[in-house]
Amino acid sequence: MNLEKYRVSQKIKLQNISTEEVIENAEKQLKKLRKKLSKIQNTMYAEGKYGALICIQGMDTSGKDSLIREVFKDVNARGVVVHSFKVPTELELQHDFMWRHYIALPAKGKLGVFNRTHYENVLVTRVHPEYILSENIPNIKTVNDINDDFYHDRMERINQFENHLVKSGTIVLKFFLHLSKEEQKNRLLRRLNLPHKNWKFSEGDLKERKLWSKYQFCYEDVLNRTSKENAPWFIVPADDKPSARLIFAEILVNELEKYDFKEPVLSKKVADRIDEFKEQLNNE
């Protein structure tokens, strides 16, 4: 699989990028990758030099939750921490827009997964600028005070934030699950048609769907402005869920393997006494 074709390394147009890619035996291939990912995380934990921040964005119904469930199910439960960011709480609104994301960052040795991310602050709020008013920012009194420069400045601060993370030992990988409007329609209908899926449906989903074009514009701008060599975006075609999960896992494993994590070597002092320690245990 040519994984580089998914990386955003030059200016892109979302309308020119396919939302569908079907890979044969995707589920079977994913099982093998899950085991490999688990071993990588174990070694990364033993080495203790790096953590990994895995950011996942996508339109409603793009498959974020199920992807996380299926890809990370073989990783040690203590080795992966998932955060799902909702509407900011009153406490979170009393801090800067990055605060709640900073305190959720993964420790060294762990995989941190952000299901929706700090990019919501330049995506959802750009489609709904009235949300910014609840942040009580000096000099922002009405939505008329919020323009493209405001969001581009935030994107640059996000770039600086991620650059700081990388220099501090956090691997930053970002994934956009690229879903077609037609497939979203099918998935919303499925939620309505299947009783056990009804709870997932919200009338708000239909209201947001009417803003599809605005969201696509905002995503495209974010992808073009914030995909950097040290914190890249990858666009994953999301219309076929099994294939999307496999592509995501392939990219993740491939990127993590570049760091060649190594388990620490015993000190000579301890290594020289291994036989002695074995004897102590055997003679108990």
Image (cartoon, helix red, strand yellow):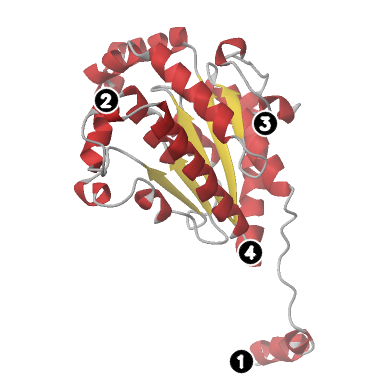
Question: Type of residue at label 1?
Answer: Glu
Under tag 3, what secondary structure?
Answer: helix
Find residue 144 and name its label: 2
Q: Residue at the location (25% across, 42% down)?
A: 135
Mark 2 vs mark 1: in front: 2
Q: Residue at coordinates 66% horizontally, 36% vertically from top-left?
A: 251
- Cα separation, mark 1 vs mark 4, equals 37 Å
Query: Would you place residue 214 above or below residue 260 in this image?
Result: above
Q: Which mark is residue 29?
A: 3
Please say whether residue 278 is visible from this viewpoint. Answer: yes
Which residue ends up furthest to the top in the rendered image?
182
Image: 1 above or below 40: above
State which tag comes first along the sequence, 2 or 1. 2
Tell me, yes or no, whether the two marked residues, 1 and 4, touch with CB atoms within 8 Å: no
Crowd class of label 2 (few under 14; some 14 to 19; many from 20; radius 10 Å):
few
* Residue 49 circle label: 4
Where is residue 87? Give x, y as percent: 27, 37
